[in-house]
Image: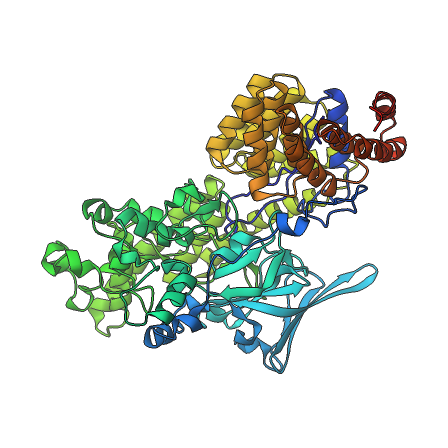
Amino acid sequence: MVNPEIPAGGATGGAARGSSSPRFRIVVGLGGLLLVAAALALWLRPDRWLWPDRPPPAAPVVVDDDDPDQVLAVVNPGYVGIEVCAECHAERAAVVKTSRHYLACRPATGAAAPGFKPGRGLFTTRVPGMRFEMTRTGNDFFATGVQATAQGEERVSYQIGLVYGSAGKRDEMYFAWQDDRLYHLPVAWLYPFDRWGHAVNSIHGRETPPSCLECHNTWVAHVPGSANRYRRDDMILGVTCERCHGPGREHVEYHRAHPDDPAHAILHPGTLSRERKMDVCGQCHGNTRALGTAFSYRPGQPLDAYFHNVHTKYPEDDTTNQVRYLGESKCFQKNSTMTCITCHDPHRPKSRQGGCYKCHTAAACTEQPRLPEAVRGDCVGCHMPPRVWMHVHFYSTTDDQYLPIAPRADHRIGVYPEAKQAVLLAWRRKQNDTTSRAEAERLAAQLTQHWLNEAEHRRRAGRFKAAIGAFREALQVEPNPTTRQRLQEVIARQNELDDLVIAETNVDRRHPEEAIRLLKKVLKIKPDYAYAHGELGTIYAMTGRRDEAITHLQAVAQCDPNDSHGVTMLASMAYIDGRLEEAAALCAKAQEIEPGHARNHYIWGQALMKLERWEAAAEQFRKTLVSNPTHGGGNQGLSEVLRRQGKAAEAVRFARRAVRWSDPRNADVLLTLADAYLGAKRAADARTTLEKALDVAETNNPALVPTILERLRTLPQS
């Protein structure tokens, strides 16, 4: 019998790449209604919102010949760092060090925010009773969150360890170490506004997932199966040479011995096909989710073997997706050689290279004769306009909320009438003649109305963050109190939505009806909110309201085609009901929607094991362990399958891992280990394990005691 716990976390749109919203967790197993009851008990757990990587409990059985450090070992594949590259490429390396790629992540000494200066470190937030205090002592930087509570002030202090930066152009975001765990701090410095802001309504740091580090660094060793544990001894911070050229150790060693030979054992991205070149950029500039371990992609390999490319319905749900939008452009589709580096030099701080004139002449633009000569060369302003997308924003500053830092160019190269109007308006406002002033007023009125209409359209569709972005576009054109008031109204609506979700995540686990009430209010505000449908469907499933559960779980993928949570939950329900073929088919569907999730592979493996499709079940359990080798149920299931395949030694190894990384109160996993020992003809070890299982079961699972006693009675004498 396999450990039935299934972590059910999932990503939602609008957050940073790889971030997760809290999910209920479902229990899937072999006992039908008993397991539904166990599911409810799991939902009632006080730690249900924690990432399922909490420190493994002390195992009741000593693992004597399977070194967990080897299981979780992560080996640097040959990254050496930019200083080693500079031994031969000093000039190029010096330029790269001025680029935003290089500055994407730096040690704490790289913090440069004016907010750390004396007198500027206090940030009193809009949240009642919440403030942050930022200080500096030499090269040490500190952030302390303070929250007023009924019991007095709660204070949480962090020493900043890493800094995400953008050369002083946009923001500085901060991270703190607690032993080997990395936390993303809620406070950041916003350069365009010269003030502090915070990203979430909390003083506590959030776990930093590997997907966050992966786009800002060249190499960081992530401990597999953990949410935020990293090895700090060989980090290569920032996006440097090897992120695009591949690990350089072999190249360096060869050329230290053969300095005059042609380049050896290193990739020149310029030699790749267009698709592979785009993949190099797409690993960070596409909206991707990792399929396996962090930092496993190598330039020159197909990106889709390592990442799932997410195609969101709306741009505010993207994190970054310049590669997708460029690919949708006629320019890209008609020019078989065009790539990102046609316009961008990745080595330089100012990378735009005037790529338009590589393919087009000025005369090719039919608008040129009607444009003032001064703006005729602004191809990008008209055809790749800066947008306020709202996909990355800060929750609050002292006087504003849902605040994006800076606009990004729309990489879907096209014809945008409002963009041309914006270019002309900017030029007209710089002129002093009467005609220009009148034309500027006309253009401003047209542009303002365009964005107000767009904001209203988005608001009616329940796209509140997108509507906030459109109102901000209108305010950039023409600030006025009426537009500001309408912006505040939609901000209040988004606030209401977010507050309901926060309240739901904090609901007393013993009262699911309160969570149901809050989720219904969420869906009244935003009927197409996939996350809320998934949560509500999960609670209904756990509390026996089957029909209502199915309705909401089916709605998840309908509302968000990239969210597999609903389908995976339906697979869980099918498995519990004994509809094994249907469960396997639903898992296959979930895999198509959102590949690589351990929870889905685990359910799939259980269904296939029940169907006695041993080889296929083993494949799914092994996939469960790819992203999380500490998954207790995955290890237990694989051991069961391997034992049935006659692979005794391997079955013992995975059963031991299951014991190590499962709850010590779980007697069932000890039975799996005892069975594995028996299969390997190790009766003495089986007896010791069964005796320990009996001790555990007498306290935590009395129903299992007769089974254990029967196993002991029939055990061969050693």
Number of marks in the image?
0
Left or right: 432 as drawn, with respect to 471: left
Residue 205: image location, x then y, percent: 65, 59
Q: Quadrant of residue 388?
A: bottom left
Q: What is the image's colouring?
A: rainbow
Q: Nearer the viewer, residue 419 or 70?
A: 70
Q: Is residue 418 visible?
A: yes
Quadrant including the N terminus: top right
Left or right: 108 as drawn, with respect to 457: right
Residue 343: image location, x then y, percent: 26, 60
The residue positioned 33% from the left and 64% from the top of the image is: 346
Q: Nearer the viewer, residue 386 or 295?
A: 295
**Relative to 510, does residue 334 appear above or below in the rendering?**
below
Left or right: 365 as drawn, with respect to 194: left
Residue 472: image location, x then y, percent: 43, 57
Residue 500: image location, x then y, percent: 65, 44
**Relative to 470, does residue 172 appear above or below in the rendering?**
below
Quadrant including the C terminus: top right
